[in-house]
Image (tube, rainbow, N blue to C red):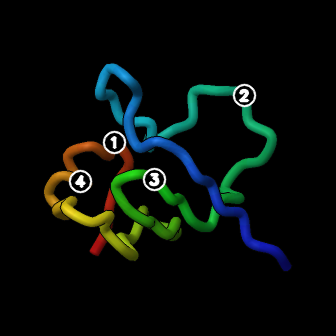
């Protein structure tokens, strides 16, 4: 079985999080994303929320959490 990896900017040009709790766009699949790679870091998608895998150089975990609407679990 394959993995679905999404590569995107973490925030909009207005600074709003693009890593949301619930998708507001039409879905082609639900609960299919395994990993999100953004300019702030790498997040794995779990059943209870996102797990921080790696932070981008110069980014703190506090900065990543502040820019993320979705739940980040430890």
Q: CA distance from mark 3 to mark 2?
A: 21 Å
Decide: few, some or many residues near mark 4? Use Cα within 10 Å; few <14, some 14-19, many ≥20: some
Q: CA distance from mark 3 to mark 4?
A: 13 Å
Residue, disc 3: 38
Which mark, residue 65? 4
Q: CA distance from mark 2 to mark 1?
A: 19 Å
Give the residue drawn at x 52%, y 65%.
45
Sequence-earlier tag: 2 or 4: 2
Q: Quadrant of residue 21?
A: top left
Q: CA distance from mark 1 to mark 4?
A: 8 Å
Give the residue drawn at x 58%, y 52%.
7
Q: Could you say which is closer to the camera, residue 36 or residue 50?
A: 36
For numbered disc 4, what is the local secondary structure? Answer: helix
Which mark, residue 26? 2
Q: Quadrant of residue 23?
A: top right
Sequence-earlier tag: 3 or 4: 3
Decide: few, some or many residues near mark 3? Use Cα within 10 Å; few <14, some 14-19, many ≥20: some
Q: Marks 2 and 4: which is nearer the front?
A: 4
Sequence-earlier tag: 3 or 2: 2
């Amino acid at each position: 079985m394959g993995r679905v990896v999404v590569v995107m900017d973490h925030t909009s040009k207005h600074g709003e999080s693009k890593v949301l709790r619930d998708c507001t766009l039409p879905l082609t699949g639900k609960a299919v994303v395994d990993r999100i790679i953004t300019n702030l870091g790498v997040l794995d998608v779990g059943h209870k929320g996102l797990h921080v895998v790696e932070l981008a150089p110069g980014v703190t975990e506090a900065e990543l959490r502040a820019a993320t609407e979705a739940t980040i679990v430890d």
